[in-house]
Image (spheres, grey):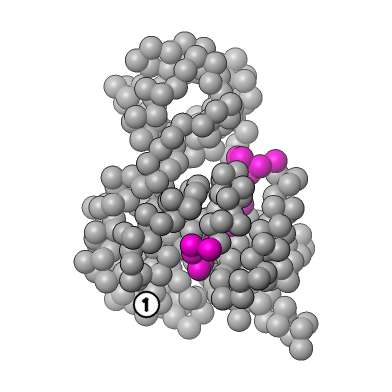
Amino acid sequence: MSKIICTLGPQSLNKEFLKFSNKKIHLLRLNMSHLSLNKLSKAIIFIRKYSTVPICIDTEGAQIRIQVKRKKFFKKNQTFYISNKRKNTKLYPECVLNNLKKGDILSIGFSNLYVKIIKKNENALCKVISSGFLENNKGVHLVNRKIKLNYLTAKDLEAIKIGKKLKIKNYALSFTNSVKDIVQFNQLLKDENKIFKIETKNAIKSFKKILKYGDQFLIDRGDLSKDVKIENIPVVQRNLFKLKQKYKNKKIYIATNLLESMLENNYPTRGEANDIFNSLEMGAAGLVLAAETAVGKHPQDSVRFLQKMIKAFIKSNL
């Protein structure tokens, strides 16, 4: 039976949802991209007070994020600065700013905000080439080239130390890019369960090799859409499952936009139901709720609907 993995956040890191999670959810995910180190231990202790579901620490990994004070909409041709010294707009990790060049194009978040760097010194002056919202802690994708980042951040390493101290047995590596990343993560966490997230073009190209070194993989279709055209995401998903077919004991989970409409509504769309069914038919070992349970208005209803879909899929194959 396919597993349900839920991301905890403001809407679900509470007594009511955690009690509900028992016997319904298989793994509770803590996303380090949205959780500070000083809150990690408290969160784990709080979760264990009300739930017996295992916890998974999901690392930040090799991703660039933007930090701003408040959400703002930018129109085409407007400009703003990115600076490590300014309090308003910064990039994380801070080393990224030094590697940017004039002419670089950045895609920020998922609201279609694209900017071009038109001046670069110790700061970067950005000109908007496609309108969208600039929001705190959103992912940043360098469109025209790649910047080499460490596979784990300093924050990730500290989170893993805290996790080991509190006997957390499940960890996820975000932005897995190569066999080398997997080997290093395996060495760091020899006795723990590890999930390797496939969300870059490099990971897709290397997947045949990567498969040999890990047992659990997660296709994050959100961040993957920054590297792959959205119309090709279903093709990539299908092809990754095909490559996995000869490895019967290995598992692939599916994440992002499974029940996006349920961020606001208490019932999904027909398209979402069809997507979930197709993912299960491809062989998904589990389904991951992210924003749906972290910040959505109907976290429990989202879980209940996934349960219904899994039961319907099983029944259809009897």
Residue bounds of the magenta highlight? 212-229
Question: Which element carries disc 1, helix, strand or loop?
Answer: loop
Residue at screen point 70% across, 41% down? 229
- The residue where tag 1 is placed is 51
Q: Which one is in front, 151 or 92? A: 151
Residue at screen point 71% across, 68% down? 282
Relative height, residue 196 to residue 168 (above, below):
above
Amino acid type of disc 1?
A: Ser
Q: Quadrant of residue 247?
A: bottom right
Residue 242: % across, % down: 70, 63
For residue 219: magenta? yes
Residue 310: % across, % down: 66, 77
Q: Which one is in front, 97 or 276? A: 97
Kindly tell me whether residue 67 is visible in this rendering: no
Residue at screen point 58% across, 65% down? 253
- Horizontal side of 48 relative to 307 (left or right) equals left
- Horizontal side of 232 relative to 54 (left or right) equals right
What is the quadrant of the C terminus in the image? bottom right
For residue 226: magenta? yes
Crowding at label 1, few (<14), some or many (≥20) Cα neighbours within 10 Å? some
Disc tally is 1
Residue 255: % across, % down: 58, 59
Kindly tell me whether residue 110 is visible in this rendering: yes
